[in-house]
Amino acid sequence: MTRASRGLVMLALGVLILQRIWTGTLVWFVNPRTLGLTWMAALGMIAMAGSLLDVRKLRRVPAVTGFHDAAESRTATESHEHEHGHAGHEHAAHDHGAAGSYYSLVVLALPLIMALLVPSRPLDGGAVANKGLNTARPLARADATSLKRAEKPPEQRNILEWVRNFNYAADAAVYSGETADVTGFTYFDTRLPAGQFIVARYSISCCVADAMALGMVVRSKQPAPAGNAWIRVRGPVSLAKIGDQPMPLIQAASVETIAEPADPYLYP
Amino acid sequence: MFAGARAFAANRWSRVTFFVVLAGSVAVLGRAPNLPGSLTIMSERLHMFSTIFQGIFIEAVPFLLLGTLASGIVEVFVNREELARYIPRDAVRGVLAGALLGFCFPVCECGVVPLARRLFNKGMPLHVGIAFLLAAPALNPIVIVSTYTAFGFGPILFARIGLTVLIAVVCGLVFSFGARPERVLLPAAWPVLAGGSGSEAQVKSAPLAQRVGQVVSIAADEFFEMGSYLLVGAALASGLQALVPQSLLLGLSTGPLVSVLALVLLAVVLSICSTVDAFIALAFAGSFTTGSVLAFLVFGPMVDIKSIVMYSGVFKKRTVGYLVILPLLLTILAAVFINLNLNW
């Protein structure tokens, strides 16, 4: 019983991850750099589930009560497994109700339950207030390659690259007058004067737990779009400040609302 | 930690009602289109929680799987005598070996706990295992490369390695003074008495296919057990991230002591994998004191919410307390010393 239900939960977890890879929603949760590992984990779990659900072995398990809860009697379980696979055992003296294994099953099923109950969506502007807009410098690895990569033509730089350039430049004023063309979501920072808002993106190193919001200040003559809307902003760049922190500012020539991009995050 | 849960589980109807009500309200909060003001914020927080929770799960599950497989392999293919032969006899060299063992097992904190528990089963001395547990997540090839990539060949890289070894060795030595496994470890991690089960000899002679089957079976057991600790930790970490504004902590970037406390707390709350924490630390390097960034890099891999919960599956409560407090004090001491005396 325990073995079969564990097998089913594992199978479902593996399938859930495969489904996320398939539908492209995996990037809502982790940096695609970890895709290889994630594939491995999904297939590994499915293979393990296959071995747990192996019909020949399942049939051999006698219907006795008190199947071992791994948490309670590990050594006993193992010595028993060494001796004869998963067949019946005689460690009935150990006190281990079904509760422990029941709870480990429920806990392991939590990602499935959350995925079913709460429609998945990427981290959005609603979380910036909690995550904090990161205005600290520098924002990514200091090696030469990533700096060189950041030396793209201004129109092709994303928000991460703009912020990084501003942070690494000896004098950020060299970027003044260049034209930015970036996409991000709107965020209204209370420290900014009226008529200004922030176009922001999350930068993800590994998974959304380490998400950091980065942004550029936008000054626009048009009325600002609603909070947490995806926009594309174009216009010349100059230098602004939030508190003491220098930040790039876009004097918006145009602000258009766009659909949420397939990959909402940026990766350092 | 399942004690309360077990009492709760005893009453079937309260259990069923609780889950149905919880699931119903979560589903409503997650889906309903036009909620009134305060509920919108709750719904936002719920989405944030759900996204971060699943993110940590997807990120950690390959490492958990690797750790449990390594544990299964150790159980089936390594016997006590072999292990004992490789471990130095005296305490100092023993803990040093334990601290450097991470180079052989490149696991982060999600993988190291099941592996360490298995090594305890196999009779690894307490002090060696504790040094391994504390050092391995930060002291392995993957983490060193990522730290090098982030900070280059400089004081942060060397100080991270040095401090991690130092703290792991000191904590290991503390446990080498007369601490007995039965008083420190939960029964599940007790060393199996030599000859107690008599099963190892049989396993050794079993055909390879059967032994691989055993590895998988042990790994599956361990996956569910350690996985439940990991996910409880992940749920706590994502709950904290969804409820506590980090901007409060990010404001405390100066001050030799306050900055260290802020980043140590952040490391605990974020519970990020040690393989990438260097890139996160880099974001603080410009504004925070050097000592505090180091504290983040040294303490984070040893102790965070997920690892505290996972430790509680191996050690008795009081030991878990020591394993949090000892590294914490040592990290703070070292970091504040660096802030006050060195100018990096």
Image (tube, rainbow, N blue to C red):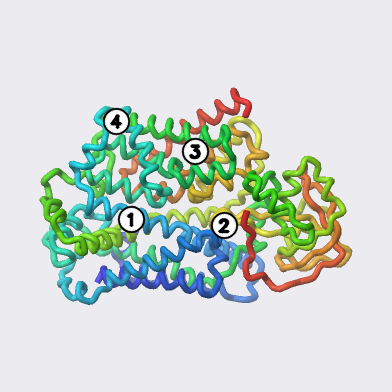
Is there one chain holding both mark 3 and mark 4? yes
| Mark 3 residue type | Val
Residue placed at 79% from the left, 57% from the top? Answer: A154
- The residue to which callout 3 is attached is B298
Q: Are marks 1 and 4 in contact (CB under 8 Å)?
A: no
Q: Choose between A50 and B208: the one closer to the eye.
A: B208
Q: Could you tell me how far apart the alpha carbons at marks 3 and 4 are, in whole angstroms?
A: 22 Å
Mark closest to the chain's N terminus, 1 or 2:
1
Q: Could you tell me how far apart the alpha carbons at marks 1 and 4 are, in whole angstroms?
A: 27 Å
Q: Residues within 10 Å of mark 2 (few under 14, many from 20)?
A: many
Q: Could you tell me how far apart the alpha carbons at marks 1 and 2 are, in whole angstroms?
A: 30 Å
Judged from the image, the secondary structure of the residue bearing numbered disc 4 is helix
- The residue to which callout 1 is attached is B68
- The residue to which callout 2 is attached is B242
Judged from the image, the secondary structure of the residue bearing numbered disc 2 is helix
* Label number found at residue B273: none
Indicate whether B276 appears above or below B28: above
Judged from the image, the secondary structure of the residue bearing numbered disc 1 is helix
Instruction: Give residue A3's quadrant in the image.
Output: bottom left
Left or right for B160, reference B37: left
- The residue to which callout 4 is attached is B176
Residue placed at 65% from the left, 62% from the top? Answer: A126
Mark closest to the chain's N terminus, 1 or 4:
1
Chain letter of mark 1 equals: B
Q: Are marks 4 and 2 in contact (CB under 8 Å)?
A: no
Q: Residues within 10 Å of mark 4 (few under 14, many from 20)?
A: many
Q: Nearer the viewer, mark 1 or mark 2?
A: 1
Judged from the image, the secondary structure of the residue bearing numbered disc 3 is helix
